[in-house]
């Protein structure tokens, strides 16, 4: 039987085309690489390289052995993937969602990884169109979006909803009029104008004339910092409820009661026609359970 270690050493040598670089990559000495090459050649009874000074080329036999090494690597990766597929606590999983949902999700993901040292969960905050694109091209295993994508290559599951919140400084009262908001001024962020058009057109139809006409107090684009100015009494803002879930000064803000609340629907999305791994099934269930806490 051919020695698997020697074959891998030779495959790296063939890829690098240089003994020193191959030795560095393998964490070996250059004489050690040469020794394993000679042993493999003796075992096969064939020369695998043709040397010309410090450089070399592969013989026909060498090309065949290199291809065998590459094939073995691919087979081993497939085997490892299959072995870990049915273990929910082993492997890597990539999730994309809105910044506000990421604030809620990531601390819980840390808890999962702490309990499962071989599980790696990567969370990326991204706009909805980028989440969809990333799931389609395989960059993300799972996405959370606020609109059903209705795409033929996407499986979408409705997992819950979250209120779009009008966030006020503490003590400003649970009910508020549009003039009160204008006096406070808006703490703006990239999504706030869309939220304002959705929420204010429902609740202040006579006074609200468009988000572009709201009085701006300040602007911040870091999702975790958005409630900060509100907590200091500098204005109001609009956020999904998940955006307040981990705010450390939640006792300094309050959510106004509006006659017509507005909710964002939440959907988990993944690629269709792919057999889900055990870890993906587990994280899908975990994300769905997390979404129910926002109802």
Image (spheres, rainbow, N blue to C red):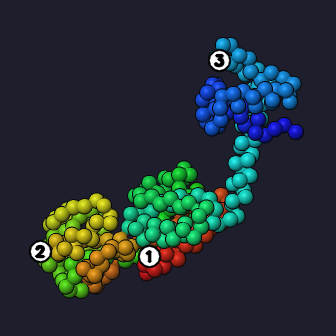
Q: Give the labeled residue for mark 2.
A: 183
Q: Earlier in the sequence, mark 2 or mark 1?
A: 1
Q: Earlier in the sequence, mark 3 or mark 1?
A: 3
Horizontal side of residue 8 vs 244, given as left or right: right
Horizontal side of residue 202 vs 293, given as left or right: left
- What residue is shown at x 11% (from left), y 74% (from top)? 183
Horizontal side of residue 135 vs 62, given as left or right: left
- What residue is shown at x 16% (from left), y 71% (from top)? 234
Q: Give the labeled residue for mark 1.
A: 161
Q: Is residue 36 above or below residue 274?
A: above
Where disc 2 sits, the SS reads helix
Report the disc number at residue 55. Answer: 3
Q: Position of residue 60 (x, y in %)?
A: 78, 22
| Residue lying at the far left of the rendered structure | 183
Q: Position of residue 267 (x, y in %)?
A: 49, 68
Find the distance from the CA under tag 2 to the CA under tag 1: 31 Å
**Residue 180 position by quadrant:** bottom left
Find the distance from the CA under tag 3 to the CA under tag 1: 64 Å
Binning the other alpha carbons within 10 Å of mark 3 as few (below 14), some (14 to 19) or many (20 upward) gives: few
Locate the N terminus and report the quarter of the image it occupies.
top right
Q: Is residue 282 visible?
A: yes
Front residue of this view, candidates 41 and 84: 41
- Marks 2 and 3: which is nearer the front? 3
Q: Earlier in the sequence, mark 2 or mark 3?
A: 3
């Amino acid at each position: 039987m051919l020695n698997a270690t020697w074959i891998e050493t030779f495959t790296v040598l063939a890829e690098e085309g240089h003994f020193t670089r191959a030795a560095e990559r393998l964490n070996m000495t250059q004489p050690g690489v040469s020794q394993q090459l000679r042993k493999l050649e003796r075992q096969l009874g064939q020369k695998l390289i043709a040397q010309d000074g410090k450089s070399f080329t592969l013989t026909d036999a060498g090309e065949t052995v290199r291809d065998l090494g590459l094939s073995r690597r691919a087979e081993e990766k497939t085997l490892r993937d299959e072995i870990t597929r049915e273990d929910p606590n082993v492997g890597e999983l990539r999730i994309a969602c809105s910044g506000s949902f990421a604030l809620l999700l990531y601390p819980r993901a840390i808890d999962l990884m702490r309990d499962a040292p071989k599980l790696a969960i990567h969370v990326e905050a991204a706009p909805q169109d980028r989440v969809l694109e990333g799931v389609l091209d395989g960059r993300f295993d799972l996405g959370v979006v606020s609109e059903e994508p209705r795409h033929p290559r996407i499986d979408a599951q409705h997992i819950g909803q979250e209120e779009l919140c009008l966030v006020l400084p503490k003590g400003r009262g649970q009910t508020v009029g549009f003039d009160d908001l204008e006096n406070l001024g808006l703490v703006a962020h990239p999504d706030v104008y869309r939220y304002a058009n959705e929420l204010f057109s429902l609740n202040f139809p006579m006074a609200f004339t468009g988000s572009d006409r709201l009085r701006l107090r300040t602007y911040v684009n870091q999702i975790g910092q958005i409630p900060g100015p509100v907590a200091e009494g500098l204005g109001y803002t609009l956020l999904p409820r998940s955006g307040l879930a981990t705010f450390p000064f939640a006792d300094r803000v309050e959510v106004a009661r509006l006659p017509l609340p507005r909710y964002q629907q939440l959907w988990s999305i993944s690629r269709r026609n792919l057999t889900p791994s055990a870890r993906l099934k587990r994280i899908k269930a975990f994300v769905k359970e997390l979404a129910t806490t926002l109802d």
